[in-house]
Image: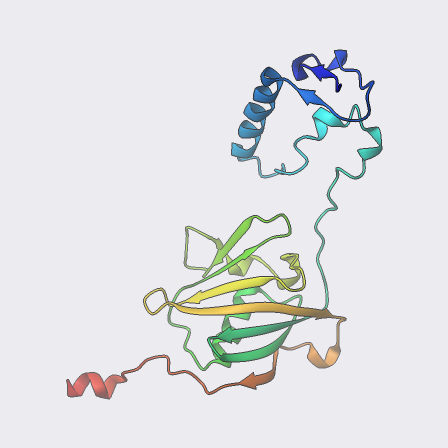
Amino acid sequence: MPVSCNINSASTLRLHYGKSICINNQGLHKIIEELDEELDSDDENGTKFGILKSYFQTYFPEWENNLLLSELEFADGIYIFKVSLGNIWRRISVPANLQLCDLADIILDAYNFDYEHLYEFTYKDRYGSIIKLGHPYMRQLESSEDYLIGELCLQTGVNITFIYDFGDSWKFNIILEKINPMDIALAEPKILESHGEMPVQYYQDDEDWEEE
């Protein structure tokens, strides 16, 4: 039978029957309470992950390095994105040192849209947390001006949703297809491939409104 222990008195724990732990209700409740407190904290210098390390590392010393996540680093290179709007898509390349707000402008240029509206990027980071970054004028979100592409630590295959103009709600799907080594020939953003006709951003121009 596995050893039953109270996590409150972890020093009494002995693993005589393999490396499995049976935690009684009192100990489990304590862990849950502490997890809730830590997950709810606003400590910008902390991390949500590896929370259980302090509970289990004493009994599994070989996990010392396994329980540590590698620090996020700037990922240099040329990012190849496929940006789709329904059946219309554009494949674009951008360098890692480009600001995310510049990527928004490139997407709008690729679809011949103006810059008159707010936007929002949404994606999941490598931990599964939902990240939202917005137009620099959107105070409720972190600004796309504050991040370079290479600082986002995007994984190949990640899906990013780009919503432009919250009135008409143009929804672009962005897939990071690959990250190539830095290439001086692609040091500037480029449209590599296009499929489909340019969509019409506004279905009625000024003359149509005047006629009405």
For the N terminus, the image quarter is top right
Please identify the residue farthest to the left as the structure is shown.
212
Whether 90 is drawn above or below 45: the answer is: below
Q: Would residue 154 appear left or right of 133 to someone viewing this image?
A: right
Q: Toward which corner of the image does residue 75 lie, by quadrant?
A: bottom right
Describe residue 57's horizontal placement relative to residue 176 as left or right: right
x%, y% of residue 193?
A: 60, 84
Q: Is residue 50 above or below residue 176?
A: above
Query: Residue 79: percent from the left, percent from the top?
Result: 66, 70
- Relative horizontal placement of residue 185, taking residue 143 as reference (left or right): right
* Percent of width and height locating residue 147: 58, 58
- Image quadrant holding the C terminus, namely bottom left
Work out whether 2 lies above or below 209: above
**Quadrant in which residue 135 is drawn:** bottom left
Q: Nearer the viewer, residue 135 or 212?
A: 212
Model colouring: rainbow
- Residue 106 lies left or right of residue 199; in this view the side is right
Write the residue at 66% across / 61% down: 150
Q: Which one is in front, 79 or 175?
A: 175
* Picture mark count: 0
Q: Residue at x 70, y 50 (%)?
A: 72
| Residue 204 percent location from the top left of the image | 27, 83
Q: Quadrant of residue 56?
A: top right
Give the residue at x 50% y 63%.
161
